[in-house]
Each structure stands twice: as structure tokens, then as C-alpha cells.
């Protein structure tokens, strides 16, 4: 059984946590967790384009791949930071180390995901449902927007985590 986790706002979560330091959790408790619209940008096909968005930027109608100039015209208060894939990768690897509390078999999946082989481990957390809920709640508590799913194959777990999150598939393999 595979648990897939994805972090759709990992770069902006990293920036927000860095800016707020240890005070990010207090701001979240006080209801001031929204840092405003924040995006990362990088040069793609000769133009500066948005490569990551926080929830606030997404709610204002901004899209990944959109030009920075157009995004700023739509949302003048948008804070644009240069993308740092190396820092994002280091953070994902640190999260992989952190989730080894659930299983010792953890692997990175691209720039924004993790796979956990949870075969034989779920019963230690009261089953797959409580295990997934605990993992997602803890990740939220430490400041990360995470989505997850559990399935028999990595492909199905990956798809559910990204497109129909927080589900457990009991579909048979084969």
C-alpha cells in the first residue's frame, strides 16, 4: 500500500515560514495566517512566469505559467519572489525525513510530492484512515498545505492525492 503526499504550495509555504520565523504558528492561531498574495517566478520560454502560488494568489484568479506583468496588473499587491528549486528540494527532503515517523520507506516524487510505502505500518496508527488524517493534520500544524491519498499502486495514489485528495482506494491491483 502506498500513501502519496503532494504539497501544491511548497515554495510559497517555505517563504512564508521563513519570513515569519517562529511566529508563523502564532499568526495562524490569531487568524492572521494569510500573508497576502504570494508567488514565485522563474524565466520560462524567455519570459518571467509564475511557477508557484499561495492560496491567496490562487483565489485572486492568478494561474501557474501566467506572465508576471499580467499577474501584477490583475493583483497589484502580489508579492513575487524568485523561484529557488534547490531550497524547495532541500525542504522536500527534510519533509521526507519528517514523515519517516509513519514508515521507513519514503521517497521523493518530483518537486512537490512524496511516496510512503505503508504496507504493514497502518495498524500502528489505527488503520489507513487515521494514519492519513494524522499525517495531514500534523503537516498542516507545522505550516504546510498537503494533500494525500492511499492506494495499492503509486500511480493511483499519486492521481488521487493531486486530483481527488484525502481518499483511500481499495481498488484491487490487476
Image (tube, rainbow, N blue to C red):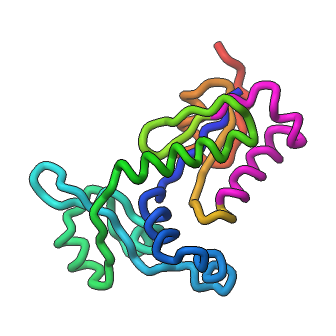
Instruction: Check residue 109 for magenta coloring.
Output: no
Q: Position of residue 24 (x, y in %)?
A: 58, 76
- In the rendered structure, the answer to whether residue 103 lies left or right of residue 28 reads right
Q: Position of residue 109 (x, y in %)?
A: 49, 36
Q: Residue at x 59, y 34 (%)?
A: 115
Q: Position of residue 30 (x, y in %)?
A: 66, 86
Instruction: Check residue 123 for magenta coloring.
Output: yes
Q: Residue at x 22, y 60 (%)?
A: 49
Say which of 165 and 77 sits in front: 77
Can residue 163 be seen in the rendering of this structure?
no
- In the rendered structure, the answer to whether residue 56 lies left or right of residue 52 reads right
Q: How many marks?
A: 0
Q: Relative to 79, say whether 107 is above or below.
A: above
Q: Quadrant of residue 124?
A: top right
- Read off the magenta span: 116-139
- In the rendered structure, the answer to whether residue 67 lies left or right of residue 149 reads left
Say which of 171 and 105 sits in front: 105
Q: Position of residue 20 (x, y in %)?
A: 52, 77
Quarter the N terminus occupies: top right
Residue at the extreme top: 174
Can residue 171 be seen in the rendering of this structure?
yes
Residue at the extreme left: 46
Q: Quadrant of residue 48?
A: bottom left
Q: Residue at x 52, y 69 (%)?
A: 17
Quarter the C terminus occupies: top right
Q: Residue at x 58, y 27 (%)?
A: 154
Task: Please tell me whether the stretch drawn in magenta is mainly helix, strand or loop.
Answer: helix
Q: Quadrant of residue 73?
A: bottom left
Q: Relative to 58, say whether 146 is above or below.
A: above
Q: Relative to 55, say whether 97 is above or below.
A: above
Amino acid at each position: 500500500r502506498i500513501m502519496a503526499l503532494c504539497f501544491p504550495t511548497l515554495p510559497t509555504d517555505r517563504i512564508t515560514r521563513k519570513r515569519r520565523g517562529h511566529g508563523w504558528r502564532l499568526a495562524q492561531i490569531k487568524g492572521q495566517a494569510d500573508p497576502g498574495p504570494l508567488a514565485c517566478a522563474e524565466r520560462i520560454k524567455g519570459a518571467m512566469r509564475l511557477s508557484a502560488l499561495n492560496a491567496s494568489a490562487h483565489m485572486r484568479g492568478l494561474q501557474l505559467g501566467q506572465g508576471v506583468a499580467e499577474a501584477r496588473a490583475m493583483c497589484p499587491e502580489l508579492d513575487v519572489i524568485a523561484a529557488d528549486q534547490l531550497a524547495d528540494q532541500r525542504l522536500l527532503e527534510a519533509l521526507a525525513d519528517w514523515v519517516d515517523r509513519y514508515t521507513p520507506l519514503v521517497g521523493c516524487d518530483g518537486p512537490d510530492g512524496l511516496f510512503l510505502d505503508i504496507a504493514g505500518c497502518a495498524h500502528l496508527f489505527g488503520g489507513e484512515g487515521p494514519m492519513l488524517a494524522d499525517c495531514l493534520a500534523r503537516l498542516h500544524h507545522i505550516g504546510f498545505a498537503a494533500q494525500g491519498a492511499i492506494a495499492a499502486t503509486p500511480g493511483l495514489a499519486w492521481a488521487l492525492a493531486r486530483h481527488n485528495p484525502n481518499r483511500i482506494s481499495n481498488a484491487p491491483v490487476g
